[in-house]
Amino acid sequence: MRQLRPTDVKRLHREWNRRSSGRLSLLLDGVQSPYNVGAIVRTAAAYRVEHIYLCGQTAPPSSSKAAKVSLGTDRYLSWSAFDRGRDAADSAREDGFVVIGIELADAAVPLHQLTASPDVCLALGNEDHGLAPATLDACDAAAFLPMLGRVGSLNVATAAAIALYEMRRQGWA
């Protein structure tokens, strides 16, 4: 076994890109840490997220601290800012996305059991409090990431990465 050379890596990524037909976007509601936003942007670019809807006190991807973590990958996607989560969710729906809140909520189902449309906007919330109640109410569905250990929640950037991977995995299955 050997590591792939750069040309082989490009070939591998092209193959997976052809297998991926659905559209993904993100809604970030009150994600205040620019470092989390930068990490989310980098992961979003890797999973071909086309747009990020920012609302509340979310740090912009253009901030110097977010850019330091995203390493220039923000050039691969677009973003827009809204004052309220409901407005961001409405805009995502107008763009053809079904909005799924990633949240520990009473109506949430495990993300791997959710039957999602091909065009999904995943909504993730504040590092401490999750999605604002009004933003959660504006979602079309809610899902959670099952956890097995003694820790009851994940860093928002980690949760975004897992949720993006799961949405792509469902498209590949």
Image: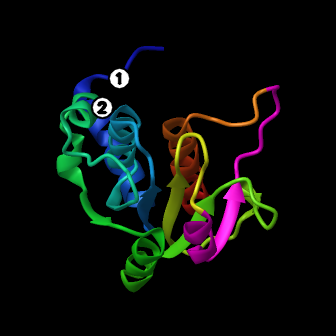
| Magenta range | 133-150
Q: Tell me which residue sits at (46%, 74%) in the image.
A: 89
Front residue (pair 105, 133): 133
Label 1: few (<14), some or many (≥20) within 10 Å? Answer: few
- On the image, numbered disc 2 is attached to which residue? 8
The three-letter code of the residue at mark 2 reads Asp
Q: Is residue 139 magenta?
A: yes
Q: Tell me which residue sits at (39%, 85%) in the image.
A: 94
Whether the residues at callouts 1 and 2 have beta carbons within 8 Å, the answer is yes
Query: In the displayed structure, does residue 143 sit left or right of residue 65?
Result: right
Q: Name the residue at the bottom extreme.
A: 94
Element marked by disc 1: loop
Of the numbered discs in the image, which one, if any, rests on residue 87?
none
Marks 1/2: CA–CA distance: 6 Å
Q: Where is 149 relative to 147, above or below?
A: above
The three-letter code of the residue at mark 1 reads Leu
Query: In the displayed structure, does residue 34 sit left or right of residue 29?
Result: left
Q: Tell me which residue sits at (36%, 41%) in the image.
A: 37
- On the image, numbered disc 1 is attached to which residue? 4
Q: Point out residue 110 in the picture as x, y percentages from the top left corner.
A: 76, 55
Label 2: few (<14), some or many (≥20) within 10 Å? Answer: few
Q: Point out residue 151 in the picture as x, y percentages from the top left corner.
A: 76, 28
Q: Is residue 163 magenta?
A: no
Element marked by disc 2: helix
Q: Point out residue 14 in the picture as x, y percentages from the top left corner.
A: 32, 48
Front residue (pair 88, 5): 88
Q: Point out residue 107 in the picture as x, y percentages from the top left corner.
A: 79, 67
